[in-house]
Image: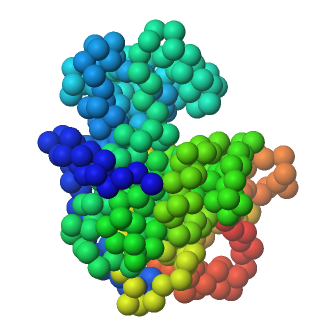
Amino acid sequence: MITLSKIVQAKKRISNVVTATSFGYAPLLSTETNTNVYLKKENLQLTGAFKIRGAYNKIATLNEEAKEKGVIAASAGNHAQGVAYSAKEFGIKAIIVMPEATPLLKVIGTKDLGAEVILHGDNFDEAYKYAKEYSAQHDITFIHPFEDEEVIAGQGTIAIEMLDEINDLDIVVVPIGGGGLISGIASAIKQLDPRIKVIGVTAKGAPAMYKSFHDKKVFNSKSVRTIADGIAVRDVSQSNLNHILECVDDIVQVDDEEVANAILFLLERQKLVVEGAGAVSVAAIMHKKFKFTKETKIGAVLSGGNIDVQMLSVIIEKGLIKSHRKMKLLITLIDKPGALMKLTDILQTANANIIEIDYDRTSTKLSYGDAKITMVLETKGKKHQDEIRKLLVEEGYEAKEEV
């Protein structure tokens, strides 16, 4: 494991730059899960994620010659901003290699922090390979996102902050991608209070670390696919697996549906914007992926909040449909004056708010003289939707639903 002294040193180095994010009780989530949950809000960190801790600590340990040459990293997200921000603080050059398909917003965000961006490759692995080659050719330091002791030590400072606030935790739940975050947190916790269980959470669509932990040997995935893009890591680092096998008590998995539920709950009930990777710890608690009681004190790390707004929009829309606050109806009407008005009058009687409507009379699937109406309704729950369905049937309408 990473020594506690190394993590304490990291805490001193980063203290003037990195935010000591809040760690507090989450009453609504605790009530929902019938336990005691405390949230470590790294989504409120300077760059929106924990990555700045390890990046800043690593750069701080470089000698002056290395700093003068600059640093390079490969990332399409949080690590990129962490390295860029840290390099800017030290007044040194930073190069970030990003996949060519990286969203423009992330590219601009990284450039705005002063870094030079090189777009290369179709995915992270190709960008990573290019960055390593560039590092060797130009003799500049490569800042690894997770397989580096100084980076890991920086991430471990989160655990010290958590235990400084609440020293009687029973379980700490941590997202896992490459394993740098949990290696640092678990190393600190097991040296400060080995009684505390450390549980890692991976996405089912990126199963490499989960399988490697349970098989106790490295397993690399052929591909990854998950909305938790911050932990969508294909390959496992042997050194990080060793840290994890030594310090972590268990690793569990959550699927994308469970992650989406957690994102929506945190947004709506806890008023926190959290990305997929940052929400997996809460998803594991909400969906009871490990054992706990109503007396258990659980610390959950929200590792980041840099979620793509389009993804957030999709999650919200699907969530509203699943929670019976929206319904989509497809109804065929006779295409004549007053037919649509009659339908809307019925829906008004049911106190349903029409927020979207489409009138199609030209589809080749329709009989002549018919029109297909697609409606999106704002509703007040399952009981309200049942009342709407019943009323439509009583009035002779055959309504299909999109889910």
Percent coordinates x, y for residue 323 in the rendering: 53, 74
Percent coordinates x, y for residue 298 in the rendering: 39, 76
Query: Hey, which quadrant is residue 397 in on the image?
Result: bottom right
Question: Residue at horizontal 42%, vertical 82%?
Answer: 32
Tell me if residue 7 comes above or below residue 380 in the rendering. Answer: above
> Looking at the image, can residue 70 be seen?
yes
Instruction: Tell me the quadrant of the picture where the C terminus can be found.
Output: bottom right
Tell me if residue 22 comes above or below residue 137 in the rendering. Answer: below
Question: Residue at horizontal 78%, vertical 47%?
Answer: 363
Front in this rendered view, residue 20 or 191: 191
Query: Hey, which quadrant is residue 309 in on the image?
Result: top left
Front in this rendered view, residue 58 or 339: 58
Q: In this view, does 215 lie to the left or right of 347?
A: right
Percent coordinates x, y for residue 375 in the rendering: 59, 61
- Residue that protrudes farthest toward the left in the picture: 16
- Residue that protrudes farthest toward the bottom in the picture: 294
Question: Residue at horizontal 73%, vertical 56%?
Answer: 371
Tell me if residue 380 comes above or below residue 205 in the rendering. Answer: below
> Looking at the image, can residue 30 be seen?
no
Percent coordinates x, y for residue 344 in the rendering: 55, 69
Q: Is residue 250 left or right of residue 116?
A: right
Question: Residue at horizontal 28%, vertical 52%?
Answer: 5
